[in-house]
Image (cartoon, rainbow, N blue to C red):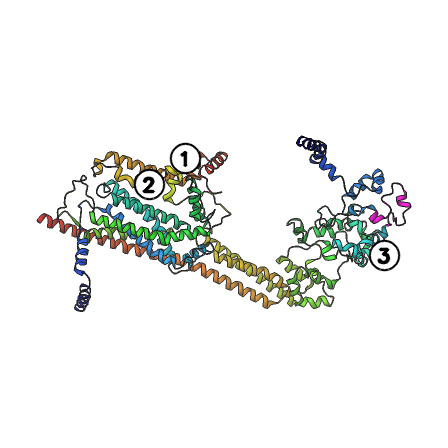
Amino acid sequence: MSWVSGLAKLRWVVSVSPLAFIFLSPLGSFAVSAAPGRGPSSCETCHMESDSALVESFRSSVHATIGCHGCHGGNPNEPTEDAMFAAEDFKGKPDRKNVPEFCGGCHSDVRKMNPFGLRTDQLAQYKTSKHGEMLFGKGDENVAVCIDCHGGAHQILRPKDPASPVHPTNVPATCGRCHSDEKKMPKYHVPATIPGDYEKSVHAAALRVRKDLSAPTCVTCHGNHGATPPGVRDVSEICGRCHVREAEAFSKSPHASATAGGKMKACISCHSNHAIHHPTDELLRTACADCHKKADDPALQVRDEFLAGIGQIRRDIDSTRDLVQSAAERGFEVGEEQVRVEEAKTAFIALTPAQHALNLADLSKALRETETRQDDIQRSIKEKILGETVRRMIFLPAVIILVLLSIAFAAKRAEIEHSRRGNGNGG
Amino acid sequence: MNEKLTSMRNSIEKFLRARYPWDSFKDFAAHQAQKPLPPHVSWWHTFGSLALFLLANQIVTGLLLMAYYRPTSDHAFESIRFIQTEVPAGWLIRGLHAWGAALMICMLILHMIRVFVMGGYKKPRELTWVTGVLLLGVTVTFGFTGYLLPWNQLSYWATTVGTEVARAVPFVGNDIALMLRGGEGVSGETLGRFYVLHVAVLPWAIVGLVSIHLFLMRLQNLATLERVGEEQDIPPHHAVPFFPEHVLKELSVFTVFLGFLLALVIFSPPELGEPADPFNTPVGIKPEWYFLSTYQMLKYFPKTIGIFTSMIPPLILVLLPFIDRSLERHPKRRPLAMTLGALALVGALALGIVGKISETHIRFFGKPYEVDLYGRWTPEEGSAPAADTTVSRAENRTGSAP
C-alpha cells in the first residue's frame, strides 16, 4: 500500500506545482495584486476609452475605494449606458456652483466621515468664507471651490501627501494660483502681490529653508475652508496663537488700547502682514517713527531707551562671551561660565517678546540681570587667571628655597665626608 | 625646657622598657641608621629612594583625592572637575598624583638600569631584583587602572583598546576581557573594578612588595662592584654611613626633584579633557607613555603572536639573575651584557617614539610628513588612501575597538 500512497502524493505535487510556480514567481505576485475584491466598474471600463488619464488618476486618488458611483451614483455593474440613464440616483457631473454641496453630501455626513476621523463642518465653514459668500451670495463662479484647491475632481490626495496641493509646502502656491493673478484679483480689490510677499517672509523661510511643516502658511492665519481676511481686532489674536508671549506682552502695552480704539492695526502695524521680516533694531527705529512722527514725542524716547538697552545687553553678552572664549583658549576650565553665557543669551531672547509691553521697568530688570551675570562671569574668570598667576609666583620662591636646601644638604654631606676621610687617613 | 623634655622622654622610655624589649628596638634602629654602605655608593643610588618618596606622595595625595572622587560613570568626570577647579589646592593634589605616577615609573626604570649596570641583581640578591621587577609591574598596573578613573575621552578609549588586547590570549582571552570590563564594553562596571584595584588591592600589593624589597636590601646591604662570591668586608674608614651621609645626599636630590615635580604640576597641569562618550571614538587613541613601546610592537605581529611576544621582555627581566650567571659585576668587565642591555633600551625607546608619532602629521626639517600606523613616513601630498588601508589592516590585526 505504501507505493500507492506514494503515487498519490506524487500526483498531488504534480497537480499543485504549476500553481506554486505562478504564485511564487514575480508574475504570480502580479496576478495576486491585480485581483482586487472589486473588478473594474462599468464606469471605468467605458471612460477608460474616452479619457484614460482621468480614470488612471482617479485610481490613485483618495476616493478610489468608493468608486465613481460613490459620488456620481449610477449602477457600476451595468455594462451598458443604462448604468447612468436607467439608475435613479445617477447625478452625473455637477455644475461648478454645486460642487461644494456635491462634496458636502458626504463630507457633512457625520456617519460617513466618522470612520475616517474627518471633520464635517467644512461645508458650513466654506459658506462663511469669502469664497463661499461670493459663490452662494453673488453667484460668482470664479471663486475657489473644493476641487480648485484639492487638485481637481478626480485627483484628490490626502493632505499629508507631499504631492497634494494642500500639503503645507504646497499651500502658498495653491492659493497663489489665483491670488497672484493680476487679472483676477483687482476685481476683488485684493492685491496680487500677497503670495510674493509671503515668499519673502520669515514664515516662508521657516517652511522652505528649515523645512518646518508647522511654519505658518496662508491657511494658518486665514483658515482653510472658512478662508477670510482677519479683521483688524483679530490680528493680535491670530498672531498670538503662535506668538503667545508677544501677544501677552502686547495686551499690556499702550498699543492694545490704541488697537481697540481702531487707531492701530495690532501686530501688522509694525511687522506688516505677509512680508514679515526678521525683527531688527532697524525695525524698532523706523516702525515707531512711522506713527510717532513728532520729534519730541515721548514714545520715541521710550524707543531710544529700548534701543540703547538692547544694544548694551548685546554688547555685554558679546564681550563676556569673548572673555570666556579667550580664557578657554588659554587652557582654563570655563564650562560653568559658558553655561552662564548661554543663560544670558536665553534671557536676552526672552526679552524680545517682553519688549511688546513697552515697559521700561522690564528693560531695566533685564539690564540689571545681564550686568550681574556679566560681573559674576568676569569675576570668576579673573579669579581663575589670578589663581594661575599666584601659583606661578609662588613657584619661584618655593624653587629658590628648595635649591638652597639642596645646596645646604650637599654641603653638609661634603663636610661629613671630608671629615670621615680625614679621620680615616689619620687613623 | 630641655630638662623637662629629657624627663618626659625618660618617663616614656621607662614605660616602654617595662613592657617591651625597648633597648633591643633602639639598638636595631641605631644599627640600621649607622649601617655602613659600600664606598662606591654614588648619586646614582638615589633613584630607589626617590621612587619610595613618590610612593609616599601617591599614597598621601591618593587618600586626599578619595575624599572627593566619585567612582561612578555619572559622577567621575564631574568630581575630577570639581577637584581641579573648586577644592582648595585640589589642582595641586591632583597634579602631584598624576605627575607623581609618571615620575615614579621613570624613577623605577632608572633605578633598574642602575642596578643592571652595577650588577646588583646577581647572587645573592636575585630575589631583591625579582621583587623590584614585580614592583615595576604593580606600579604600571597602578598607572593603567588609575588612567581610567578621570573618565574622560582619552582614558575611556585607551582603556577600551588596552582591555581589547586581552582578547588576543587564546581560549580565555574573551573571559579575561569580560572579567576586566565587567561587561562587553568599558562601562561604569569597569570603572568600579579599576577603582577597587587601584585603591584597595594594588596598595596592599605594593606595600607588601616594597617591605620585602627593603628588608632584603637592608639584610644583604648594597652590592659592591666585586665579583660574585669575592665581596670583601668594607673597611670602616671607606664605608659610607647611611645616616647622615647618604641620607643627606638623598635629601639634596629630593629637594631638587620636588622642585621639578612642582614645576610640572604648575606649568604643565594634567588635562581634564572631554567627558567619556562611548558613542564617539576620537582619532589616534594612544596609551600612556610607558605602554607605547608595547603598543607599537603589538602592531607588527598577528594578534596571538603579538600578545606572547609582548610577554617576552618582562619575562626576561624577571629571570635576568638566573639567565646572566657570570660572576663579574663591574660594567667594564661585562661587555656582552652591557651591549645587549643598551640595545634593549634603545629598542624600547625607538618603539616608544614610533608609537608616539604614529598616525600623526609631523614636520621634519620644515617638510610635512604623514606617519602611518607602522611608523612609515610619507610626504603629506597624496598619501591619504595608503593611510586608510593601513589603518583598516591594523584594526583587523589588533582587534581594536570599533
- Tag 2 and tag 1, C-beta contact below 8 Å: no
Q: Give the range drawn in magenta.
A: A69-95
In the rendered image, the vertical position of residue B115 relative to residue A255, given as above or below? above
Q: What residue type is labelled 1?
A: Phe
Q: What residue type is labelled 3?
A: Phe
- Say which residue label 2 marks: B314
Residue A18's x, y, as percent? 72, 32
The Cα–Cα distance between marks 2 and 1, rounded to whole angstroms, is: 18 Å
Q: What element carries label 2?
A: helix
The Cα–Cα distance between marks 2 and 3, rounded to whole angstroms, is: 98 Å
Displayed quadrant of residue B394: top left
- Say which residue label 3 marks: A136
Residue B348's x, y, as percent? 34, 39
Chain at numbered mark 3: A
Which image quadrant: the N terminus of chain B? bottom left
Foreground pick, A173 / B132: B132
